Amino acid sequence: MKNNLFVLLLVALGLPAAAQATGPLSASLGNVKLTFALNAARQPTYAVAYGKKPVVNASRLGIAFEGGAGFDGPLVLTGSEVKNVDETWEPVWGEVKSIRNHYQQLTVHLRQPAAPGRRLDVVFRVFADGVGFRYEFPRQLALGNFVVSDELTEFALPADHQAFWIPGDYDTNEYLYTKSRLSAVDNSQQVKSSSDIAVRVAPDAQAVATPLMLKADDGLYLNIHEAAQVDYPAMQLHVDGASHRLTARLVPNAVGSKAFLHAPSRTPWRTLIVSDNAPDILASKLILNLNEPSKIKDTSWIKPMKFVGVWWEMQIGRTDWKYAESADTLDAKGQLIPTGRHGANTANVKRYIDFAAAHHIAGVLVEGWNVGWEDWFGNWKENVFDFVTPYPDFNVQQISDYAKSKGVQMIMHNETSGSATNYEQHLDTAYQFMNKYGYPAVKTGYVGRIIPRGEHHDGQWMSNHFVRVAEMAAKHRVAVDMHEAVRPTGLARTYPNWMASEAGRGNEYNAFSIGNPPEHETIMPFTRLMGGPMDYTPGIFKLQGYSANPARRVQTTLAKQLALYVTLYSPLQMAADLPENYAQHLDAFQFIQDVPVDWDDTRILAAEPGDYITTVRKAKGKDEWYLGSITDENARQQPVKLSFLPPGRRYEAIVYADAPDADWQKNPAAYQITRQVVTSKSVLLLKLAPGGGAAVSFKPVAGR
Ligand code: NOJ
Ligand code: CA
């Protein structure tokens, strides 16, 4: 308020710009301090420090418009406010029962002198573990419709940090991570496609996607991403290797514009999570806190669950999604000629339902059940699927009845083959169909180029589409798991039925490509999962020899597949392997059967991106704890103090560990299961094989 008056006074006195306020203004919480100022050219800048260490040096802010007079030139600082918020909220599901949202907010008011009356606010929220900020365009006469041509946000890093990065591709995040200095970022040789060919993926060889994980030589860990990406394209970062300056790069629409907006509106939050301790990055709730509370009032129908599915068998080429050889080839009676390899047939589906029922797995996903798969891949065709017409050998009524009789829930699959317009036309009927047959959840997919117009998966149009799908699903009380969607930004807080997304390189790459090296899963939580749960599809037990191509193999041990149920969080979590492969190792499957998908508490006990992660979680509403510990290609000994257990109680620890001779390359399936009684004073020494892991369940000993 004081600032407002001061500037009004200056303007009234007709004083030159040089006499007007330029800051600095600041906000801080704990170790984190944010400073805002106009620079010598009167452009807005911000800087962030963690204790005495600079995190981001003075960096530009601004938004450029098509047609000029955006907020890119010199601006006038007209005022500011600070407020403090400290509240606690409970997520519908998640890694913890309640979340503290504690921050100091600084709002800065700016004016564009070149377009009289045109105003912009920048809102900063400073948390104990980082900063979020966004641009807000208040309601104003001087700004109606406008088109963003560029966002000028910069992150001027003080040094050439280690980065864990994937290319800034406009359509996919399904890449392996490269660990390199920022100055060495070059995405032109990245391997993307299922055929493992190196392709030039982004027009900018120095563009990386977020979440971007960084480690400074002075011991600071820094994660850059965004929160609440709604009605705006995804932000990528252009890396200037020489200056260590990152610049926001917005994914364009089909004709090169970035965002169509109308005041009042606002951009997503830009997030910086910082700590001198890597586990704190994984424990951060900053991104969720920056999202709006649930828009769904009654959330009682939203239920986390595990599921099996008619899926991996298609991925490894044993069966197929399609029913017929081709949609145009008919036999003498005018019927489609079946391939004989159609996975989604009633008898096979019942086999999965039986397995789920026998092992208390709540759901069964079936892909390839509906007409269209003869024609889905690589064709830029609008109306491939109608989402309601089953193939002749998939008896939807019989399958729903059978599942119901066994207490199992069916999970719908809606592959759109990239035709988002077609999906939008069928959304209502598709979700009514799910309601009719009792499907509580749907997995969606967007393989291929997007219709309309070749919009990008990560652009503004699709970001709105994904929200429309989540809203329509909520209207029909259906949960969604989106594949090939834009990477999440914490929107599951606002749409708790949007339970999972893929948007990263999942276990499926082990089916059809060079696969995921052992370090991959130690990087994912620091990158892709910072925005929200991932449908990674863990739980492959037959780790090699599953594909016609002998080179295909899962690059972990079996015990590590179990540990992933704890280290990679998702409220919709698949047990991805075939029932017959689980039948070979039912003692190990017991961990998958037991492990929850909803938690009261989570502690990251040890973590280093690219090397190892040990996480322990407490089951929702139960005195049971589950631990997962994973390593990269190096064997490791991980001592674990059990001080997280409530004192004075005895628990049976069941340890699912790599056998002494286990090794992801030489002996991946060698595991051993041991039991012991422990207390909060005990220490477990977990021995992780190369590419290995360990999973532990802790249940109270009866009569304690
Ligand atoms: C890609 C998805 O990630 C995968 O899980 C699915 O099976 C195929 N698309 C087919 O929809
Ligand atoms: Ca995929």
Image: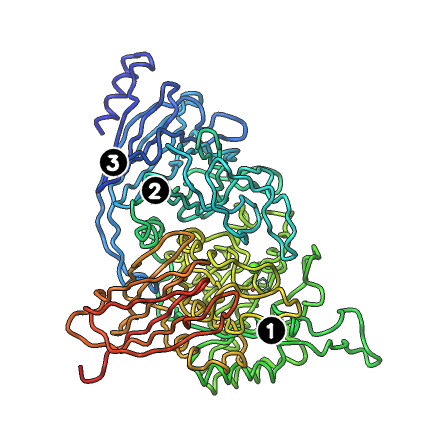
CA distance for labels 1 and 3: 54 Å
Residue 464 showing in the rendered view: no
What residue lies at 62% left-to-right and 63% top-to-bottom? 512
Residue type at mark 1 is: Glu
Image position of 349 (left or right of 686): right
Task: Pick out the residue farthest to the front.
Answer: 661
Which mark's residue is nearer the viewer, 2 or 1? Answer: 1
Residue matched to label 2: 132
Amino acid type at image mark 3: Ala
| Image spot of residue 515 (x, y percent) | 56, 60
Asked if one can make out residue 140 in the rendered structure from this viewpoint, the answer is: yes
In percent of width and height, residue 235 lies at 48, 42
Q: Position of residue 216 (x, y in %)?
A: 36, 40
Tell me the element at label 1. helix
Residue to which mark 3 is pinned: 27
Label 2 CA crowd tier, 10 Å (few <14, some 14–19, many 20+): many
Furthest residue toward left: 648
Residue kind at label 2, given as amino acid type: Gly
